Amino acid sequence: MIGDLFLDGGLAIFEKAKPSTRALLLSLIFGGWGGQFYNKQYLKGVAILLGQIVSVFLILFGIGFITIPLLWIGGTIDAYMVRKRMSRKRGDLRQMA
């Protein structure tokens, strides 16, 4: 019951969010690649996802602890900025407010 309430409330918030905020949230939740897929930048999303997978193996050498957050944060910022730019080009008035 509590889970249903959380999901319903969460989906309502997501549906009301601006497109750039949706891209940001998806990237935060899905490791930097979620927002890329939302922006229909599939190649970039796959590249980030593959980078995350390789980074998991690089944890054995200590490098993955650096690359995972870099890919996550970089993918999140990029998804947000790209969606914001896309919305401006289309003249999305909600985005401009």
Image: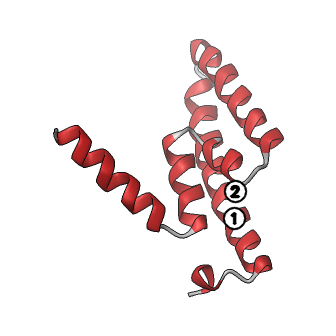
Residue 56: horizontal and vertical position, in percent?
Answer: 60, 19
x and y percentages locating residue 21 in the rendered image? 53, 64
Q: Position of residue 42 (x, y in %)?
A: 79, 41
Q: Quarter-wise, where is residue 77 in the image? A: bottom right
Query: Do callouts 1 and 2 mark residues in contact (Cβ within 8 Å)?
Result: no
Q: How is the image coloured?
A: secondary structure
Q: CA distance from mark 1 to mark 2?
A: 8 Å
Residue carrying label 2: 78
What amino acid does circle 1 point to? Answer: Arg
Q: Say few, some or many: other residues with alpha carbon within 10 Å of mark 1 (under 14 / 14 to 19 / 20 or more).
A: many
State the residue in front, 73 or 11. 11
Residue furthest toward the right?
43
Q: Secondary structure at mark 2?
A: helix
Along the line of sight, which residue is nearer the eye, 63 or 10? 10
For label 2, the crowd category at 10 Å Cα-Cα, with few meaning under 14, some 14 to 19 and many 20 or more, is: some
Circle 1 residue: 83
Which is more N-terminal, label 2 or label 1? Answer: 2
Q: Residue at x 61, y 79 (%)?
A: 95
The quarter holding residue 82 reads bottom right
Tally the marks: 2
Residue 11 got which mark?
Answer: none
Q: Split into 4 quadrants, where in the image is the C terminus?
A: bottom right
In the foreground, 27 or 65:
27
Question: Relative to 95, does residue 61 appear above or below in the rendering?
Answer: above
